[in-house]
Image (spheres, rainbow, N blue to C red):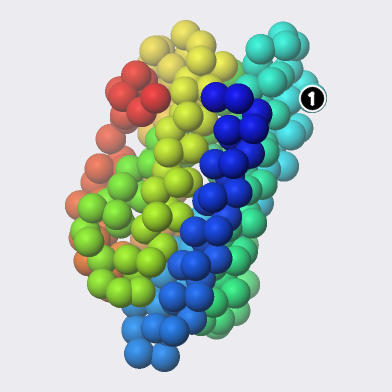
């Protein structure tokens, strides 16, 4: 796609996010689902903040023009996701501050980093492919309003994340096909599931069975399945 085409598509997506945010505003007072969405968006936004910084940093460390360009593109995607989710949050209920949960989230995302970039990419592969599955689950349950208003945003993020899965899979190289690679993927997915377990009620409210979702997340994805 040309630069103009990409720019037009991004502009269009921004307009959709604004419209959805207005819609949620209207439904907020009557929809207990709004709080569940706010909890889910809070976790996603935390991940996006971490991802935007991570990919910028990784781009600087990578040799090879192709990978550098791909990582800069991913970093730009993550910044856009940050913006979309921040806009949604403006129209969603404020969450009760939970410093202990934020500490858990921070610890989980900090532990993804590794001085060996292949290990770091394998972990990002594990995380982003899990996020794709999570978002697809929310979308597929035809959630009640106002959750229906955020599914187009989730869908856009999911499509971008699927592309990121392809980038991280290629960057991790042969490691993902080894036992160590599978262990790395499982560690990330188990860690993510533990963090998400604190939001199990939110998934139930959005008609997503948390036990089934967590079981799926704790399976190693096929390396070629998500890109
Ligand atoms: Fe993202
Ligand atoms: Fe991503």
Q: Position of residue 139 (x, y in %)?
A: 29, 54
Q: Identify the residue shown where x is 33% and y is 43%.
A: 133
**36 lies above or below 7:** below
Q: If the image is split into quadrants, where does the N terminus sit? A: top right
Is 73 situated left or right of 22 in this image?
right
Is 68 situated left or right of 161 in this image?
right
Q: Position of residue 94 (x, y in %)?
A: 56, 81
Local SS, label 1: helix
Name the quadrant where ligand 2 sits: top right
Answer yes or no: is residue 43 visible: no
Q: Identify the residue shown where x is 72% and y is 9%.
A: 64
Q: If the image is split into quadrants, where does the C terminus sit? A: top left
**85 lies above or below 173:** below
Answer yes or no: is residue 3 visible: yes
| Residue identifier under label 1 | 60
**217 lies above or below 63:** below
Q: Nearer the viewer, residue 206 or 24?
A: 24
Q: Identify the residue shown where x is 47% and y is 37%.
A: 161
**64 lies above or below 15:** above
- Residue 190, image quadrant: top left
Q: Identify the residue shown where x is 71% and y is 19%.
A: 68
Q: Position of residue 153 (x, y in %)?
A: 45, 55
Q: Position of residue 149 (x, y in %)?
A: 38, 66
Q: Classify mark 1 as within 8 Å of ligand 2 or not, answering yes or no.
A: no
Residue ranking furthest to the bottom: 29
């Amino acid at each position: 796609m040309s630069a103009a085409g990409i720019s037009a598509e991004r502009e269009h997506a921004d307009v959709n996010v604004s419209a959805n945010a207005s819609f949620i505003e209207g439904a907020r007072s009557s929809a207990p689902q709004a709080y569940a969405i706010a909890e889910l968006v809070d976790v996603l936004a935390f991940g996006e903040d971490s991802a935007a910084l991570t990919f910028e940093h990784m781009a600087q460390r990578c040799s090879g023009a192709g990978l550098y360009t791909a990582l800069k593109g991913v970093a730009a995607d993550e910044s856009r996701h940050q913006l979309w989710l921040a806009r949604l949050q403006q129209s969603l209920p404020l969450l009760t501050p939970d410093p202990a949960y934020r500490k858990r989230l921070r610890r989980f995302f900090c532990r993804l980093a590794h001085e060996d970039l292949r290990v770091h990419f394998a972990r990002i592969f594990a995380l982003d492919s899990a996020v794709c599955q999570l978002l697809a689950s929310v979308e597929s349950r035809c959630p009640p309003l106002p959750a229906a208003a955020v599914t187009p945003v989730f869908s856009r993020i999911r499509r971008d994340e699927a592309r990121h899965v392809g980038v991280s899979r290629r960057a991790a190289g042969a490691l993902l096909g080894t036992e160590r690679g599978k262990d790395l993927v499982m560690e990330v997915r188990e860690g993510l599931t533990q963090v998400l377990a604190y939001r199990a009620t939110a998934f139930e409210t959005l008609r997503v069975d948390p036990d089934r979702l967590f079981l799926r997340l704790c399976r190693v994805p096929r390396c070629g399945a998500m890109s």
